[in-house]
Image: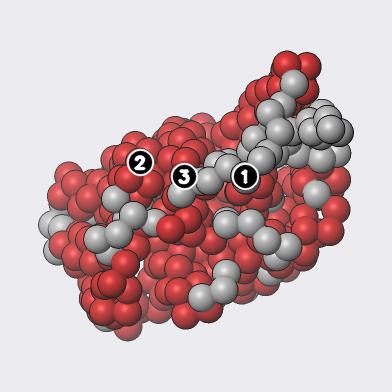
Amino acid sequence: MEDRKHFFFLNVGHFLDHLFMLIFATVAALVLAREWGLSYAELIPYATPGLVAFGLFSLPAGWLADRWSREGMMVVFFIGIGLAAIATGQAQNPVQIAAGLFVVGMFAAIYHPVGLAMIARGGKSMGFDIAVNGVWGNMGVGCAALLTGFLIDQTGWRTAFWLPGAISVVIGLAYLVSYRDRLPLKNAASASVAAPGAAAPSAASNAEWRAMLIRVTMIIFFTTAVSSMIFQGTTFALPKIFEERLVGIAGTATMVGWLAFIVFAVASFAQIVVGKMLDAHGPRTVFAVVAVIQIVFFMLMPALTNWTALAVALGFMLGTFGQIPINDYMIGKMAKSELRASIYGTRFVISFAVWAVVVPMIAWIHHTWGFDALFYILAAAALAILAAVVTLPRELPSAEPPAQPAAAE
C-alpha cells in the first residue's frame, strides 16, 4: 500500500482481531476449568457463539464497507471490539462469557472483509502486502496465548480481556482522528471505470473466461473451508496440546504461553516467503507445496512429546500459516474493486462458519479419542486441499473478460 501509516493501522487491527478471538482458548484451558468446576470439553462450546458471530457478520460488514466507508467501519471495529472485550472480562459465569464472546465476534467480523479490501488493491507487491498483514494477524494469535498466560500468573484472567480492550479503544480514537476526513466519503477504491475505447469481449472468449472464473471460484471456496478447519484446529487447540504433550518442558501457564507464542511467531513468517513466491510464481505451485508440508507434519505428530513434539508442531504451523495469504491473494487478483469487501465478506463467512463447527469438534475428538485423532483428520484435510489446487490454472482469470483487439480500419 502507498499509505504506510494506514497500512500500519490495518496491521495493528489484524493483530488485535486474532488476539481477541483466542484469549478465551487459553483462559479456558488454564484457569476456568478449575475456577468454574467444568472440564475443558464442557467449557469450549461456550466459545461457539463468538465464532458464529465472527462468520455471520462478515458479509454485512463487507456490504456496509462497500456502500458507506471502509475507514468508518474500521473505527467501529477498533472501538466496538475494545468495549466488548472489557465487558467480557466482567463475566461471572459461562453464559455471560458466551454472550460477551458473541459481541466480541460481531465486531471482530468487521476486520477481514474491510481491512483486506483496502490492502488487496493490486500492484506488483500485493502478495507481499497481504503476507505482511497476515504475519501481524498471526502474531496476534501467538500473543493471545503469551499475554493471557502471563496475565493469568500475574493478575488474573480478567485482565487479559480488559487491558487489550482499553488499548483497542485508544487505537480506534487515534484512527478516527487520522482519517476522519474520509469517513463520510465513498471509498475511492470502490469506483470502477472501464478504460475508454476498450474493445468488447467476443462470445467465445467470454464463455471461456466465465467457465474458468467459476472453476477457480469453486476451488477458492472449497480450499477456504478446508484450510479454515486446519487453521482453527491448530491455533485453538495448541495451548491444550502443549499442556498435555510438553509436560517435561512447560510446567506453568506462562511457559505454555511462551512456547505457543514462539511457535506461532516463527511459523507466521512463512507467510512472507509465501507472499513473495505468490508475486513471482502464482498460487498453484505455492499452494501445492504448502499442502504437502501440512500432510507430512500432521502425520508425524501423533504420540510425540516434549522437544520432538515441539519441533513437529512448528513444522505443521509453518504450513498452516503459510496457506493463509493464498486465497486472499487470488480473490484480490480476481475481484472487482467495488465488490471486493463484499466478496471477502463471503469468503470469511465460509471460514468462520467452519471455525464455529471446528471448536465443538475439537472438544468432542479430545474427549473421545485424544489429540492424535485430530492430527490424522487434519492430514486428510490437507490432502483434500492438495487434490483441489492441482486443478488450478497456471494464470488466474481477470476480473473482466478479456477484450478482443479492435479491427484495423
Judged from the image, the secondary structure of the residue bearing numbered disc 3 is helix
Name the residue at 51% across, 46% down.
192
Q: Position of residue 224 (x, y in %)?
A: 59, 37
- Determine the CA span between mark 2 and mark 1: 28 Å
Name the residue beneath numbered marker 3: 338
The label nearer to you, 1 versus 3, is: 1
Mark nearest the camera among 2 and 1 is 1
- Sequence-wise first label, 1 or 3: 1
Residue sitting at 35 percent across and 50 percent down?
Answer: 65
Q: How is the image coloured?
A: secondary structure
Q: Please report the residue visible at 75 percent of the width from the left and 21 percent of the height from the top.
A: 202
Query: How would you rate the neighbour count of disc 2 (Cα within 10 Å): few for under 14, some for 14-19, many for 20 or more?
Result: many
Which residue is depicted at the point 77% across and 46% down? 283
| In this view, the mark in front (2 or 3) | 3
Mark 3, Cα crowd under 10 Å, few <14 / some 14-19 / many 20+, is some
State which tag comes first along the sequence, 2 or 3: 2
Q: Secondary structure at mark 1?
A: loop
Query: Is 131 above or below relative to 102?
Result: below
Which of the labelled discs sits on residue 196, or is there none? 1
Kindly identify the amino acid type of the residue bearing the numbered disc 2.
Answer: Trp
Say which mark, if any, is on residue 331: none
Instruction: Determine the image quadrant of residue 36.
Output: bottom left
Residue picked out by circle 2 = 63
Q: Quadrant of residue 331?
A: top right
Q: Closer to the N terminus: mark 2 or mark 1?
A: 2
- Residue 11 location, x and y as percent? 49, 70
Q: Foreground residue, 180 or 17?
A: 180
